[in-house]
Image (spheres, helix red, strand yellow):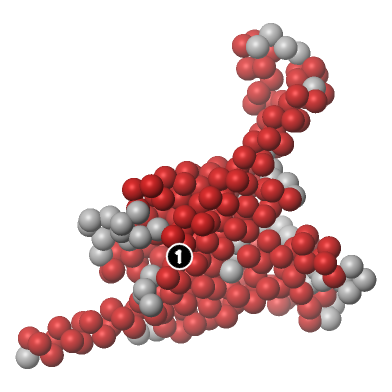
Amino acid sequence: MNKYNLLKVSVFFVFLGRAWQHLFWDAPYRSFFWDETLLKPIIEEWFNVSWMTYVTSPNTDKFVQSLIISTGILYSIAAVSSLLITKRNKIFLKIPIFLGGLSLVILAVLQTKEKFYHFAQFFEHSIQFGLPFVLLYTFTSNFKLTKLIFALKVLIAVTFFSHGLYAFGAYPVPGKFVDMVIHILGVSESFALRFLYVAGILDFILAVLIFIPKVDVYALVYAVIWGLLTAMARIFANFYWDFPLQSIHQNLYLVVYRLPHGLLPLFVLVQRKYLFNWFNVMKIKRV
């Protein structure tokens, strides 16, 4: 079994979840194309069309919807490419993975725009938009495992730290965070807020410990558990027995593209063990 298959699977889940979102639900592209402050001068001066005509035109909405669907198709192709890419076929499959990665960066920017440009909203998606480029790095001629592990630790630390800023209350605590804790644990709102506060502190601690030798393994184990739990929480908190299939269809994609939040730390743990064993072998040979 290829020791990088878990990395491929992580990239696959990111693209699959986002493809599911774009093909069946929605994405925040309208927050850009209907931004009057940003686009009104361009629409009216360059295209000689009034802003009201532009935003109410069925063609505008059709264009945005077509863009969303097209992006979903790109993510689908990138998802398959991430599983199939090898050193032999990398020339052809690198393109959709690279374009998909760029699209994920744009998506993170648009989501940040929707959240009043909170920088944490952008960096909270670091694992998701960073993974495709990390995967491509493993196929370069200057690839080194030590650099790979460091890059992945940075992505993990930034993602968890940014997530912690919301849970801690540095930004307004998202209502969906509070609702998930209440629905899953059956607690009061005040307890849910305290629970999230502690979770935020633990995220900050993780972001530091993950770079400290010998104790980084504990931070990574916590990241695996907490990353998978927070991903699965999306389906458990929003599942209703009255309409189970609709609940799954509406929320499972939220789980899928977040699974790498737990799988990536697991991958780093595996690679860390491999690298540690390699160093020990080299020491024995020198002796």
Q: Is residue 25 left or right of residue 243?
A: left
User: Quarter of the image containing the N terminus?
Assistant: bottom left
- The quadrant the C terminus occupies is bottom left
Q: Residue 141, located in which quarter of the rendered image?
A: bottom left
Q: Is residue 287 left or right of residue 117?
A: left
The residue that appears at 57% across and 80% down in the rendered structure is 225
Along the viewing direction, whichever of 171 and 151 lies nearer the viewer: 151
Q: Residue at x 41, y 50 (%)?
A: 93
Q: Is residue 214 visible?
A: yes
Q: Residue furthest left?
A: 287
The amino acid type, in three-letter code, at marker 1 is: Lys
Q: Position of residue 116 (x, y in %)?
A: 67, 44
Image quadrant where residue 134 sits: bottom left
The reply, left or right, for residue 111 in relation to residue 77 is right
Determine whether 134 is above or below 95 in the image.
below
Asked if one can make out residue 201 in the rendered structure from this viewpoint, the answer is no
In the displayed image of the protein, which residue is found farthest to the front? 88
Q: Residue at x 65, y 62 (%)?
A: 166
Q: Quadrant of residue 248?
A: bottom right
* Near-viewer residue (195 or 103): 103
- Compared with residue 217, is residue 247 higher up or lower down, i.e. above or below? above
Q: Provide the secondary structure element on which disc 1 rests.
A: helix
Q: How many marks?
A: 1
| Residue 255 x/y as whole percent | 66, 66
Mark 1 Cα-neighbour bin, 10 Å: few <14, some 14–19, many ≥20: many
List x then y, in percent, for residue 215.
Answer: 39, 84
Residue shown at 80% from the left, 25% from the top: 58
Which residue is under mark 1? 8
Outermost residue toward the right in this view? 242
Please state the horizontal and vertical placement of residue 280, each as a whole percent of the image: 20, 87
